[in-house]
Amino acid sequence: MTLVVLCCLWVIAGTLVAMLPTRHQYAPGIFLLALAPVLIWMIGRDHGVIPAALAVLALLSMFRNPLRYFTRRLAGEKPEVPK
């Protein structure tokens, strides 16, 4: 599969996960969050730094709450998980 197709599938999967109820978003969301750096690295390798930087900004925008949660967990806090 080409990189563009993989990225499109990732976006479609992210959209489908966003439509799930919050309690069912965690496992697929973590999988997508773990897969994103690999795709961004591949974008940077094939297309350059600017498209990769734009992908990082999009990732930070989409996953701002989970990233904020994991940052607080790493800092030793016990953030509340939405129900």
Image (spheres, rainbow, N blue to C red):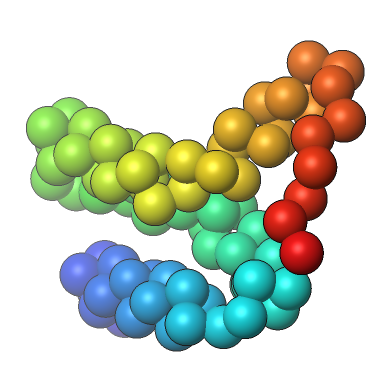
Q: Specify whether residue 12 is in view.
A: yes
Residue 36 position (above or below residue 76): below
Look at the image and tell me whether residue 52 can be seen: no
- Image quarter hosting the N terminus: bottom left
Residue 61 shown left or right of residue 16 in the figure: left
Closer to the camera in the image, 35 or 73: 73
| Residue 80 in the figure: left or right of residue 50 | right
Residue visible at 70% across and 78% down in the picture: 24
Q: Which residue is drawn at 60% across and 64% down?
A: 29
Task: Determine whether 34 is above or below 60 in the image.
Answer: below
Between 25 and 7, the one nearer to me in the picture: 25
**Residue at screen point 17% across, 30% down:** 49
Vertical comparison of 19 with 77: above or below? below
- The structure residue drawn at horizontal position 76% and vertical position 64%, both measured from the top left corner, is 83
Q: In this view, does 67 lie to the left or right of 72?
A: left
Could you say where residue 66 lies in the image, as x and y percent from the top left?
60, 45
Q: How many marks?
A: 0
Residue 68 position by quadrant: top right
How far across and how far down the image is residue 27, in percent? 72, 69
Decide if residue 75 is on the left or right side of residue 21: right
Q: Where on the picture, by quarter, is residue 11?
A: bottom left
